[in-house]
Image: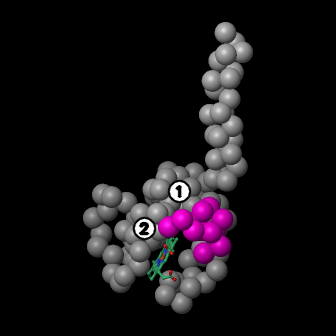
Amino acid sequence: MRAFLLLVLMPSLLSTAAAAEELIGDAVAGAKLAEQDCTACHVVAADQTRQPVGDAPSFFEAAADPAATALGLRAFLQTSHPTMPNLKLTPEETDDIIAYIMTLK
Ligand code: HEC
């Protein structure tokens, strides 16, 4: 019985470990941060009331992009973009926001 349970649980344990390795941030903190810092230009949540200005993609669109891996998002958030203000996120904030965006996939 114990061996059987182990066999059943193994794949989920492994995939949790793999996900945890890539997503070290706190998605709840990331959601709060996105709400504060990103809603001027992005729709970041389904229940967002603030109407963003400009034509920045929503975080749902960003998440749906196959290129939006944790690595790709990190690269984007750590380089400057002419159309986006330099965000000055700390490494921890970057991890949190990435974890949040990945929950929207
Ligand atoms: C002043 C407006 C503005 C603010 C504030 C802003 N962004 Fe953006 N963002 C943009 C624009 C415009 C684009 C699209 C242009 C581009 O891809 O270079 C963009 C693109 C992105 C993309 C890439 C989306 C994709 O599908 O390519 C990500 C990820 C992103 N922003 C994250 C953030 C996060 C996280 C915050 C808050 C910490 C934030 N942005 C705040 C304007 C903004």
Q: Residue furthest top?
A: 1
Q: Which residues are magenta?
A: 65-76
Q: Which mark is residue 88?
A: none
Residue 66 colored in magenta in the image: yes
- Indicate the quadrant where residue 14 lies: top right
Which color scheme did the rendering employ for the protein?
Answer: one colour
* Residue at x-position 33% and y-position 76%: 52
Residue 30 in view of the camera: no
* Residue at x-position 53% and y-position 52%: 27
* Residue at x-position 33% and y-position 58%: 46
Question: In the rendered structure, which amino acid carries the disc numbered 2?
Answer: Glu
Question: Pointer 2 and pointer 1: residues touching (CB < 8 Å)?
Answer: no
Q: Which residue is mark 2?
A: 61
- Picture coordinates of residue 79 (x, y %)? 64, 80
Quadrant (top left/top right/bottom left/bottom right) for the N terminus: top right
Left or right for 64, reference 49: right
Local packing at callout 1 (Cα closer than 10 Å; few below 14, some 14-19, many 20+) is many
- Indicate the quadrant where residue 40 lies: bottom left
- Picture coordinates of residue 84 (x, y %)? 50, 83
Q: As rendered, which of 39 and 59 lies closer to the eye?
A: 59
Q: Which residue is mark 1?
A: 102
Left or right for 103, reference 67: left
Identify the secondary structure beneath mark 1: helix
Question: Quick check: 68 above or below 29?
Answer: below
Question: Quick check: 8 above or below 59?
Answer: above
Residue 24 in view of the camera: yes
* Residue at x-position 57% and y-position 68%: 67
Q: CA distance from mark 2 to mark 1?
A: 11 Å
